[in-house]
Image (spheres, rainbow, N blue to C red):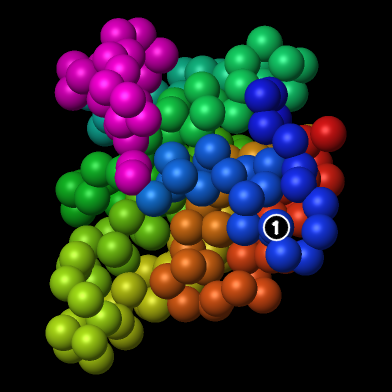
Amino acid sequence: MQSTKQIAGPASWAVPALGVLIFIACIGFTFVPLSISYAGWMVELPQKDRQVVLNLLRTAQFSRLNQLYEDLQQQYETGLINDRDLTLQYQAFYDTSPENETFLNHWVEKSPKSYPARLARGIYYASVGKEHRGSDFIRNTPAEKILELHRYLDLSNRDVVDSLPLTAKPIVNVLQLLKSSKHRDGEKSNRMWLQYGNRIDQ
């Protein structure tokens, strides 16, 4: 990653190379490389820009989606854009509209080896899971909501992990796995994915 460095030592692993990305993971974003507005750490991308990607998805223009995201991934892997810029491009798939699942499934069916298709569906499922869980404190959250969260995280992780080998530097996958692990897997899993991210992004 650009402008981030790994901090060695067991006591400092919580402020690592992926520190900026973890922060981004926690606050969430939206999509498209067009008109980005900054307000401190918060980055908001206009709804009309997110809609560009959702329109491609909902009109089954999967070849265009593959090309768009493969080009962005290549730009990241050759150093033309950084990890944050790449991560923002997937924010359209935070949209939890039920119709999106159908089109994401069709995209994966049409392109089963497509890195962006599997990753996009994984991001969508994680967002649906967090929506089911809600934002209340864990002690005030009914057990059935936690079960729904875990069910969707299982679906998400299957796509996100399976797509890891489909590109050379799957940094967005690592971010997504870090976000998911904070909901259920804890420090050991966080450390594992953190070290994985540092290895692939030298």
Residue 35 lies in the magenta stretch: yes
Q: Is residue 200 visible?
A: yes
Q: Quadrant of the image for the N terminus?
A: top right
- Left or right relative to 150: residue 98: left
Q: Quadrant of residue 13?
A: bottom right
Residue drawn at (58%, 44%), measured in percent from left and top? 19
Looking at numbered disc 1 in the image, what kind of residue is underneath it? Ser
159 with respect to 148 (left or right): right
In the figure, residue 6 lies in which quadrant? top right
Q: Is residue 47 magenta?
A: yes
Q: Quadrant of the C terminus?
A: top right
Give the residue at mark 1.
12
Q: Image height check: is 5 above or below 13? A: above
- Which residue is located at x 29 percent, y 63 percent? 130
- Near mark 1 (Cα within 10 A), the count class, few <14, some 14-19 or many ≥20, is few
Segment tinted magenta in the rendering: 27-50
Residue 191 rendering spot, x and y as whole percentages:
69, 65
Which residue is drawn at the image coordinates 37% and 69% (left, top)? Answer: 152
- Above or below, 32 against 118 in this view is above
Q: Position of residue 125 (x, y in %)?
A: 37, 58
Horizontal side, residue 103 vs residue 197: left or right: left
